[in-house]
Image (cartoon, coloured by chain):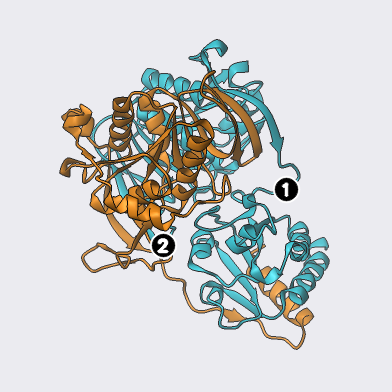
């Protein structure tokens, strides 16, 4: 049994982000492991332990993503792989999906691929569903709980959380899933785990190794630039009053006058 | 330059989502003389096909089959991919919902086509889609474009675009499509569904009342719920209240929860951490209720009340109840 988890590093979610005069983003340069991936990595380790299998953690990107891979190793993944090459610098979700799918196929025996819900830096999860499609595997997105997993019968049953409520869905392995916050209590690395991960050599796989030709590296979307959010006009209007009732009445009148409701 | 535009009219158990009508409204602008085609997948969806004309579709492609009764990734993606190959639309739109994200990403992968997810502004320039998307937890906007040839896909943030007024006199041709996969070719089965009934969904809500750490415990959400009920609003929550187990995760607004764009967002007992702001800063009007006049939420809010939420929120409920019943 082989479970694979896909991760990345992302700008610190508490950082203030601004757009510089050069059009580039400033966010303080502090990277963290994608918070969604903490659930994905933990889930992979729990599955590995329950089914006595192996777990691989993978990321696509430059060296700074090693932090997320080492986090995976420190918690208990058996191996880490980083996909990278200068040809991937302006990689979009399609190129990402082709490359990650190629790496998964190259490993050969992967039964289940786990993603965190989204990449917050690009605010998208499209690469997840596209990876499933490039693999030709079943896709179960937005999983809040794995109800059953049988690697012998090759079946999986999960709870999905969607806008209308929750669903119990069964499917066949191999499959790709994306997991939500709350699926588990994220594990944190031990001192020994961190030391072991620090020493690990992380191989880098490039397009040649993955069998990706020039056409597979063709992107279909491009970031043209960044803009700051429109500033709010004016400042907050504090509603005054002697009592809570008075303040409430004035606020309601103001909201009705401004036709907010 | 005119363009033919496809719009997915997402429906669940016969109820269409309003973001689909918003997408049809935008499609009319993008088409600029081209044809707007709504596609509806499901079982017993004639009424939705009819409504799609009223909201601006010129034609409707209807796939009515038991295998499509509820959304599933594999049969829906395979069918959309086939339809795009057959009809060659320039643009394919859907709402940014869990299903919309999956469906368009899947078909775009099959077709090696460009996809822009969760856009808040969208135009066609020289035949290529150009979008504005909030990224990095909604702290900054990214301007992105589709490049190269072929069909182009985008999912639209709910409430970021305006639907047309329905026009009952509009009609058009309905084309029938057949499923691409038979039931025995689909591995995924829906074994059970628990519908969160009677509650207003956060992403579609025009008014949201949210509680934060200031509510103090699970029972502290009771006044929040009562105000929400009077307003026909959805109930939101900040991350610390969800992490503490006071309310379920599906109420969480913010970077690791839902991103919402209501007309009115009432934040009670929420300090306004940057992760929470990421989920609600695009609300049209923000009202903050907090004991601490220095709380960061007051920097973002349009209107503020400094006070104890346990006094202010019930008072608001009472005033709204009187004023709105007239």
Residues marked 1 and 2, same chain: yes
Q: Nearer the viewer, residue A8 or B120?
A: A8
Q: Is residue B284 above or below residue B51?
A: below
Q: Which mark is residue B275?
A: none
Query: Which residue sits at x=29%, y=45%?
Result: B145
Judged left or right of residue A84, residue A247 is right
Q: Is residue B134 above or below residue A48?
A: below
Q: Position of residue B124 (x, y in %)?
A: 33, 42
Chain letter of mark 1 equals B
Judged left or right of residue A107, residue A133 is right
Dot 1: element:
loop
Disc 2: CA contacts within 10 A as few (<14), some (14-19) or many (>=20): many
Q: Position of residue A113 (x, y in %)?
A: 43, 33
Q: Nearer the viewer, residue A76 or A227?
A: A76
Note the chain letter of the cyan one.
B
Q: Is residue A123 visible?
A: yes
Q: Nearer the viewer, residue B59 or A245?
A: A245
Quadrant in the picture for the C terminus of chain A: bottom right
Q: Nearer the viewer, residue A242 or B182?
A: B182
Q: Position of residue B265 (x, y in %)?
A: 61, 63
Chain letter of mark 2 equals B
**Residue behind mark 2:** B139
Where, by quadrant of the figure, is residue B18 drawn?
top right
Q: Is residue B4 visible?
A: no
Quadrant in the picture for the N terminus of chain A: top left
Note the chain letter of the orange one.
A
Disc 1: CA contacts within 10 A as few (<14), some (14-19) or many (>=20): few
Where, by quadrant of the figure, is residue B228 drawn?
bottom right
Q: Which mark is residue B199?
A: 1
């Amino acid at each position: 049994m082989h479970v694979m988890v896909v991760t990345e590093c992302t700008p610190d979610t508490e950082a203030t982000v601004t757009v510089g005069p050069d059009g580039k983003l400033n966010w303080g340069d502090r990277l963290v492991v994608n918070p969604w991936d903490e659930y994905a990595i933990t889930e992979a380790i729990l599955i590995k332990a329950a089914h006595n299998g192996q777990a691989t953690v993978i990321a696509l990107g430059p060296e700074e993503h090693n932090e997320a891979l080492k986090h995976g190793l420190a918690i208990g993944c058996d191996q880490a792989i980083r996909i990278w090459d200068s040809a991937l610098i302006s990689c979009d979700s399609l190129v990402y999906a082709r490359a990650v799918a190629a790496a998964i196929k190259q490993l050969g025996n992967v039964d289940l691929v786990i993603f965190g819900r989204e990449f917050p830096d690009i605010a998208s999860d499209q690469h997840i569903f596209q990876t499933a499609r490039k693999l030709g595997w079943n896709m179960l997105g937005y999983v809040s709980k794995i109800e059953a997993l049988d690697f012998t019968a090759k079946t999986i049953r999960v709870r999905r959380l969607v806008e209308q409520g929750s669903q119990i869905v069964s499917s066949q392995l191999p499959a790709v899933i994306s997991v939500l916050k709350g699926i588990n209590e994220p594990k944190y690395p031990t001192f020994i785990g961190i030391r072991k991960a620090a020493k690990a050599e992380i191989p880098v796989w490039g397009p040649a190794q993955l069998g990706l030709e020039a056409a597979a590296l063709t992107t279909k979307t491009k970031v043209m630039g960044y803009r700051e959010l429109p500033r709010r006009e004016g400042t907050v209007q504090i509603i005054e009053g002697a009592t809570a009732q008075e303040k409430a009445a004035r606020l309601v009148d103001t909201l009705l006058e401004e036709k907010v409701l | 330059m005119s363009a033919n535009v496809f719009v997915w009219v997402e429906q669940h158990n016969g109820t269409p989502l309003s973001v689909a009508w918003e997408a049809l409204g935008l499609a009319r602008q993008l088409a600029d003389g081209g044809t707007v085609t709504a596609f509806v997948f499901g079982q017993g969806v004639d009424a939705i096909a009819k409504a799609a004309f009223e909201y601006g579709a010129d034609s409707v492609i209807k796939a009515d089959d038991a295998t499509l009764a509820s959304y599933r990734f594999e049969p829906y993606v395979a069918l959309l991919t086939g339809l795009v190959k057959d009809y060659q639309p320039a643009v394919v739109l859907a709402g940014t919902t869990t299903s919309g994200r999956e469906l368009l990403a899947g078909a775009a992968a099959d077709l090696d086509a460009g996809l822009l997810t969760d856009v808040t502004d969208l135009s066609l320039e020289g035949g290529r889609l150009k979008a504005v998307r909030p990224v990095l937890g909604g702290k900054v906007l990214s301007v992105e474009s589709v490049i190269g040839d072929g069909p182009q896909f985008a999912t639209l943030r709910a409430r970021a675009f305006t639907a047309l007024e329905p026009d009952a006199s509009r009609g058009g041709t309905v084309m029938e499509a057949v499923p691409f996969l038979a039931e025995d070719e689909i591995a995924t089965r829906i074994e059970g569904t628990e519908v969160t009934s009677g509650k207003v969904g956060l992403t579609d809500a025009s008014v949201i009342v949210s509680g934060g750490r200031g509510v103090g415990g699970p029972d502290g959400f009771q006044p929040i719920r009562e105000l929400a009920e009077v307003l026909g609003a959805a109930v939101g929550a900040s991350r610390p209240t969800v992490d503490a187990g006071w309310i379920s995760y599906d109420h969480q607004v913010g970077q690791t929860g839902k991103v919402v764009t209501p007309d009115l967002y009432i934040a009670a007992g929420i300090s306004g951490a940057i992760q929470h702001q990421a989920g609600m800063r695009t609300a049209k009007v923000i009202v903050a209720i907090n004991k601490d006049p220095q709380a960061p939420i007051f920097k973002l809010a349009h209107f503020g009340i400094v006070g104890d939420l346990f006094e202010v929120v019930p008072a608001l409920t009472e005033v709204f109840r009187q004023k709105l019943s007239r």
